[in-house]
Amino acid sequence: MIWNTLTYTGWGRVRSATAQVARPERTSSLAALQAETAAPAIGMCRSYGDSCLNDGGHAVDMTRMDRLLGFDPDTGILEVEAGARIGDIARRFAPDGWLPSVMPGTGFATVGGCIAHDVHGKNHHGAGSFGQHVVEISLMNGGKLQKVSPSKGVKLFRATIGGMGQTGVIVSAKLQLLPCKGDIMTVTERRIENLEHFLEALDASKSTYTVGWIDATAQGEALGRGILEEAETGYGLVPDAKPSRAVPFNAPRWALATPVVRFFNAAYFRRVPERGRTSVKPITEFFFPLDKLLEWNRLYGKRGFHQFQCVVPVSEAAVLRLMLDKIGSAGLASPLAVLKRMGSGRAGLMSFPMEGYTLAIDFPNRAGAEALIAELEEITEKAGGRVYMAKDATLDPSHLTKMYPDVTKFAKLVSSIDPDGQYETDQTRRLNIRSHA
Amino acid sequence: MTETWIILGATSSMARAFARAVSKNGDQVILAGRDIPDLEASASDCALQGAPIAEAIQFDAREAATFAPIIERASELEGMINVAVFVGSMPSQDQIDTDPSLIAGTVTDNYAGPATFLQLVASTMEERGGGTVVGVGSVAGDRGRIGNYVYGSAKAGFHTYLSGLRNRLTRSGGHVVTVKPGFVDTAMTWGIEGMFLVATPDKIAADILKAVEKRKDVIYTPGFWRLIMGIITAIPERVFKKLSV
């Protein structure tokens, strides 16, 4: 059985798709099925919206192609199949002094997905985006395998990074790993009283890894309060990461009712002592805090949730206040809200990052959520920012050109290599990306 | 002590998971199968997971000439020789009903081929005074059912062979683990209807490794299949013959 009819969702579980899914285990079987029916690749489906969905179409699940193909300890270049998970790579190589240069917030993301969304991590201000550390990509288009890199086929290379699978199936890649001291993190947490202080603290942070948690229910003087986490890799001995646990069922609606979230956030804020604290943790606990709780998306109940993530230029930081105001008064916020300083690093035509501040926040899929997100998207566009495709399920196509000025170039290239639109997904159709060609 | 695992049918996802697990333990692996480029990718993975030696080598259950070179290569390495048999094939009963000549190949892939290989390697294992054989059979081998009794009977033959081999190797310090997996989420079962309680290849590999360490004789994996098969084998034949389970 090559094609299996499956109904699946992105991580947010709001949108779903029923598609014919194949799950090849070898390059030869992938080539055979791509030659017959070209279809977009999917991985662990950790993108939140519809970028992994292809309703009524085909998709290729790459999770079984997850092998390490080669590592050069002199250069730190790792060749790996696209279905390998970032957390597994980190766990394998950190004890030897190497880490993936960029790691997203979940270790379950695959290498292919990280490339296709040009993901960023807590070190974006220094290290840039994931794609900037990709040395070479083996790309399959139709049944044909080709290697692209910054020195060979650079146009296709830059369209593949952040290209949401539109240029073909990423089969494997060579990644430049980053030297690290060891497999533990020294983490300093500090309370931050409001948004102004937060932006100052983020700007002033000298740490390699910096991330801010925001209490999105706080309003007035406390608007934008939260906790700043700064971390460095280190060596030493800490207890192993605790075994993960799973959320056993869909949570009821009241679990994330406004008073519950408000109470939780206040407690979470006070968890860190007033004078701050420094602790050591296993790397995976710092980078992938939520991975300990398998299937945590069930906490949002069976209706699922949206994650809104935007980046706005430094000069437009004031709109963050406007956004947090709207979010706070809408009463839809969840405990998950993150603020980070971004550098300018990006590697692809459709990459998300820009120099500025990025805000990510979850909203349970309730009445008013999509309308609120639409408002936030509007504000983002006016501020010259953009929203992140890896999270998006709602963006209006009219915002696309301004947020992603290279979309025309991208669409032209993609349409030339995939004229029949076989690699299209629910997201690219919704955003009408090919119409820009 | 150094251990080498010869893994037959190493391209299968269960074998891959097992090879990765023993590599993490620092064992050497010889990956035997038909798709050499694919096996070489797995060998690279095993080496990076911790195997001091990881090699790909040609093996075809239907080509007995491919057997000896594998055993020769393993014999060059020091320490215990272990063999894990993941090779097998499962044409549907419908295909076999239309073309009974498929039976011979099914029996070779699931029983005659691996048994011949094990017979050839057994004396070397005895000389080295130990070693483990892991033979992957199937719950389908516990009772003939209308849905796949040719595959089931080949696996049943293999189970019986393994039991005899266990009887033999135990005298020289060796050991044989018979593994009976239930439904496993592999390329072979992808998209087949009516699968339930499906286990991941990683779970099966972990169970096998535990059984090897504890020197278990026969395991069902996941473990609850022992109960299910206990019930199925307890049904009297005069009732069972009318069922379609």
Image (spheres, coloured by chain):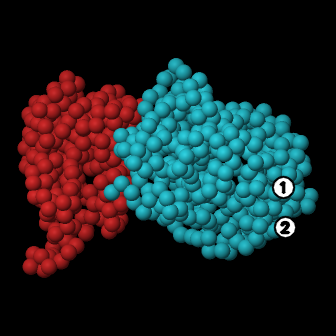
Chain colours: A cyan, B red
Q: Which one is nearer the viewer's eye here, A240 or A164?
A: A164
Using the rendered view, name the quadrant where residue B42 is placed.
top left
Using the rendered view, name the quadrant where residue B182 is placed.
bottom left
Q: Which residue does the image show at 76% across and 35% down from the upper left?
A: A344
> In the image, is A9 to the left or to the right of B16?
right
Q: Amino acid at mark 2?
A: Ser
Q: Which one is nearer the viewer's eye here, B181 or A315?
A: A315
- Asked if labels 2 and 1 touch by Cβ distance under 8 angstroms, the answer is no
Q: Badge 1: few (under 14), some or many (20 or more) residues near its Cα, within 10 Å?
A: some
Question: Up-down: is B103 above or below A114?
Answer: below
* Chain on which label 1 sits: A
Q: Position of residue A90 (x, y in %)?
A: 54, 38
- The quadrant of the picture occupied by the C terminus of chain A is top right
Q: Amino acid at mark 1?
A: Ile
Residue that badge 1 annotates:
A379
Looking at the image, the residue that sits furthest to the top is A74
Could you tell me how many numbered marks the image carries? 2
> In the image, is B127 to the left or to the right of A136?
left
Q: Which residue does the image show at 20% across and 28% down from the upper left?
A: B74
Q: Name the secondary structure under disc 1.
A: helix
Residue that badge 2 annotates:
A329
